[in-house]
Amino acid sequence: MRPACPPPPTVAVAVSVAAWLGALCCCAGPAAAELGVEARLAWEGYARPEQWTELTLRIASDRGGPVELEIGGAWPVRSEIQIEAGRTRTVRLPAQPGLDGDAISVQVNGPGGSASTRVSPRFPPAGRRTVAFVAAEPHASGAFTSLAVEPDGLPRSAWAFATADALVIEGGALARLDAAQLGALRDYVRACGRVLGVDVPPAQLAEWRSAAGCDGAHLANAGAGDAVEERLSALLALPLPASPTARASARAPAARDALVAFFVLYAVAFGVGTLVLRRAATLLIVPLAATVLLGAGLMTRPASISFSADGRHTRLRIDGLAPDQVAVDLPAHLGPPASAMAADRTALRWGLDGSRAGVQRIELATHLLSRHDFSFRFASELEGASALEGGVSP
Amino acid sequence: MTLTPTLRAVGLAGLACLLPVAVWLGGQVFAPASPGRTVALFESALRGLLVAQALAIALVGPRCVGSRVEGSGPGQALAGLALLLAPPLPLLLAIGLAGAAGSGVLAAGVLALTVEAAAIGIGVHVLDRAAPGQSGRSVEALLQIGLATTVWSTRGVWLAWIGV
């Protein structure tokens, strides 16, 4: 008779199981790096459909290296940043909510892992003016919708100010703005943004007035006892400078002229050849040769790219001649395109690092006679420059 | 192969398919319009060109094959088909470069027209044997009208098959 085996102690079993599980985990591969992302929209989440707003991302990773960022919405934006292990990095990118008001997706692909999140925009009522009150007492009015915004919710980029038709900011709040916010506010004033200061210190007001566009007509200051609503109504009645419309020019580019001339010549050549040539094979050479000539002529010419700046706005036009991928680098301070007239929304790549800092790149596919017009609300450093003909290397 | 009067007429018919489409397209691309419309214009041009060529094959095809035609034979038929399809080649290239159609769609279009031409050639030879002489000419005219009507009325079907 065999002696009964004593039951194993519970602790020993647990340790054994834990050891096996640990070994399995180690054998299965290195532990996934922790990658975290938080997303927040400027203006406390208020945004307008198909208008740019600023998205702040806070990204942290256990591992350092390149991180790819992809922002969804009506216009996709991509960027790549470097991140250091164990340190949180804050980046700000443009984001554009769609008409449907769906949440904007944020996808982060870093070393050893990926993370995603979504951020939902809040749309003010459509068809009404919107006035943002920064640390100021919001005024209820039937003429506009009031948005109460904390100083921290103010964007750091001037192009993101389009969410509000006018801004009311209290002098005391200015001390709570960081340098980027103050700079963006100054650029907004320079671009004829409507700003009503309430008890703004004279020095700050003087700085704004010296920079203000539209002869300072869109900038006003009110004392504590003044009627803010009246001043606001007067400001809102002022028209903003018209953005350059992205309408196609009635003047056709040279490529169209050349193409039409080619077909006219070809039709004449084939018609005459039909009447005078004696052999069918010789006549067949005419369309074949014309096709080869046309292909060689179009496919060897790069897209035509031209910039124009009038001191207040910048425009970019890309005329395609053949299927091609075109990339154009522009200063990021122009902001993302305020309007675009293109078959699709193309891709916007935003430079944040190293040699590409302060650069935005527009990438798109061109075709024969395709035309892509982009207008930018802010003035360009290319001012006076300019026309650049020819391809731009990717 | 010598360019017979029949082949010259076929070549001019090929040019006649191209010209209206090219003139219409030329007028449209000069009009200020959204860039996205350019692709739609070239797509419409491709549909118009294919329908015009299919109608031309239906109307001209029976005339350039068959025993009564000068220099008739397979070589004549092939040369006729080539002269009918070749003139719009530069326009087809432009349509491809404009992103309105891929090479597969363009190849399917040419294949469909070739199949139509081959079917007409076979039909005409069968008619020549069945009803030679003047009565055959009347039947041939009926065949042209019937083919052209069929091509026109079913254009939505075969254009969809091609993928246009």
Image (cartoon, rainbow, N blue to C red):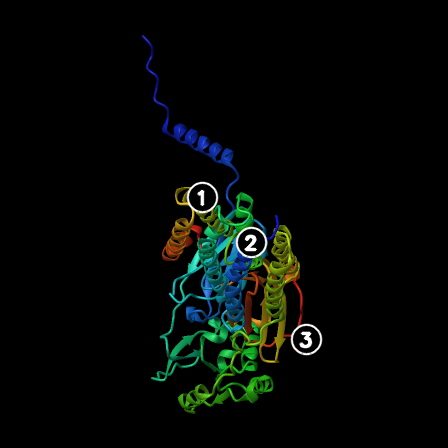
Q: Are marks 3 and 2 on the same chain?
A: no
Q: Position of residue A183 (x, y in %)?
A: 57, 76
Q: Nearer the viewer, residue A74 or A318?
A: A318
Residue farthest front in this picture? B134
Crowding around mark 1 (Cα neighbors within 10 Å: few <14, some 14 to 19, many 20+) is some
Q: Which amino acid, mark 1?
A: His
Given the image, what chain letter belongs to the residue carrying mark 3? A
For residue B95, above or below residue A178:
above
**Quick one: SS at disc 2?**
helix
Q: Are marks 3 and 2 in contact (CB under 8 Å)?
A: no
Q: Position of residue B133 (x, y in %)?
A: 43, 48
Q: Which amino acid, mark 2?
A: Leu
Q: Are marks 1 and 2 on the same chain?
A: yes
Q: Position of residue A15 (x, y in %)?
A: 43, 31
**Quick one: SS at disc 3?**
loop
Q: Quadrant of the C terminus of chain B?
A: bottom left
Q: Which residue is mark 2?
A: B7
Q: Are marks 3 and 1 in contact (CB under 8 Å)?
A: no
Q: Which amino acid, mark 3?
A: Ala
Q: On the rendered structure, is A300 left or right of A214?
A: right
Residue A91 position by quadrant: bottom right
For residue A41, above or below residue B76:
below
**Quick one: SS at disc 1?**
helix
- For marks 1 and 2, the one nearer the N-term is 2
* Marker disc for residue A385: 3
Q: Spatial distance from mark 3 to mark 2, Cα to Cα?
A: 57 Å
Asked whether residue A310 is in view, the answer is yes
Q: Which residue is mark 1?
A: B125
Q: Spatial distance from mark 1 to mark 2, Cα to Cα?
A: 18 Å
